[in-house]
Image (cartoon, rainbow, N blue to C red):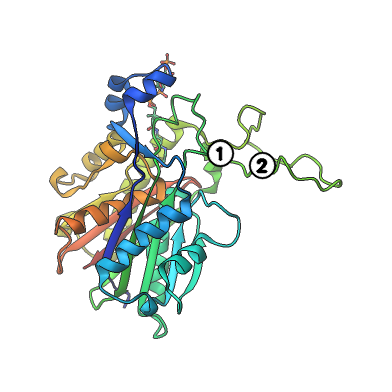
Amino acid sequence: MRGIKILGAGMYMPDTVASNDWFSTILDTNDEWIYSRTGIRERRISEDKPNWYMASEAAKRAVADSGIDPSEIDLVLAATCSPDYFYPALSCLVQQQVGAENAAAFDINSACTGFINALDTASRFLEDDDYRNILIVASERLAPHCDYTDRTASILFGDGAGAAVVTKNDKPMWSYLSAKGDFFNALWCKVDQSRANCPLLKPDTLPEGLIDTEAKTHTLQMNGKAVYKFAVDAMETAVNKVLAKSGLTTDDIDLYIPHQANARIIESAVKGLKLPPEKVYVNLEKHGNTSSACIPTCLAELKADGRIKDGMTICLVGFGAGLTSGAIVFGQ
Ligand code: UT7
């Protein structure tokens, strides 16, 4: 039986606050529009700290919170879609910074669903006797990806990192993971190879459905309406599927932590699933959408407030580029 227990959690947010009012100084937008359409008031931008730094700070805090020694970590999993380097993996940089000298390390990229996929992966490793403690970090520096002339997408995203140390548990967990590659062009950002100089290279063959003009190259491109529609349905489906697997009902869940993309998406899913809003944690007003980091930063805030208690049953649910989605239910 799979089971995970959160031993420790931590987060790192950059110092620089980009408020809705700041956006109104660079774009034709305003606080009223952004807040009423998204629930976001401000987000953080990492002016100078790379992703590996944010990830490592969050990871160090999670390890300190867990009370274990870094040498006791058997695996470091990093979820990110905005790494500083193609290689080495972000997880290897975190492993070095944290001093997790005995750990293996690899990365997972499923964009905003990254923490859910990483936690699911961790739970499967924990079924093996070789793995006892796993450090999962989800960290994103999306400011370099965003096009700050695009008022629809740039206002949504923020930078930040969240991490958790997990170990085996005799309380069960269930998961449901999904990918719908047919929607790959709803949210994408192309790798910048503009400085490649191999004389044999020709222009890239693009997948059908992807428009790559000069204006769009190498920045985050989003069909907001398509993602919105997918998101509400995907969150409801993922929660229903994971509950069906577990044999639990929505009433059996003590705490829901959804991906923090848009307050209206969360509200629609909460209404559709008939969840009590007081059981649903939302922190996007201050952080915006930090992609894979959303869920672990919620966990870190809740744990710091003493709101993650032994015996609780917790449901995580998310969606993201891919388009991917998934949900996990676990007993803490
Ligand atoms: O992790 C996944 C990440 N992505 C998402 O979760 C995105 C999901 N989608 C959304 O959250 C919403 O679709 C948005 C917040 C992105 C957009 O909200 P919307 O209610 O779907 O707005 P819209 O795109 O239909 O735009 C309505 C109007 C348009 O003006 P016109 O054509 O009606 O004159 C936009 O140009 O609002 C305009 N608009 C803005 N106005 C002021 C779009 N962005 C802004 C803005 N400020 N920032």
User: Which label is found at residue 185?
Assistant: 1
Image quarter of residue 201: top right
Q: Is there a contact, CB below 8 Å, between mark 1 and mark 2?
A: yes
- Residue 121 rendering spot, x and y as whole percentages: 42, 68
User: Under tag 2, what secondary structure?
Assistant: loop
- Residue 115 rendering spot, x and y as whole percentages: 39, 57
37, 251: nearer the viewer:
37
Marks 1 and 2, how far apart at CA: 9 Å
Q: In which quarter of the image is the C terminus?
A: bottom left
- Residue 137 rendering spot, x and y as whole percentages: 39, 60
Q: Quadrant of the N terminus?
A: bottom left
- Callout 2: few (<14), some (14-19), or many (20+) C-alpha neighbours within 10 Å? few
User: Under tag 1, what secondary structure?
Assistant: helix
291 versus 114 height, above or below = above
180, 105: nearer the viewer:
105
N-terminal-most mark, 1 or 2: 1
Determine whether, in the image, residue 285 is placed left or right of residue 56: left
Determine whether, in the image, residue 146 is placed left or right of residue 170: right
19 versus 305 height, above or below = above
289 versus 126 height, above or below = above
Does the numbered disc 2 mark a residue whose Cβ is under 8 Å from ligand 1? no
Name the amino acid, label 2.
Pro
Q: Which residue is drawn at 44% across and 24% down?
A: 151
User: Which label is found at residue 115?
Assistant: none
Q: Is residue 126 at least partly visible in the picture? A: no
Name the amino acid, label 1.
Asn
- The quadrant where ligand 1 appears is top left
Mark 2 lies on residue: 207
Q: Residue furthest top?
A: 28
Determine whether, in the image, residue 306 is placed left or right of residue 330: left
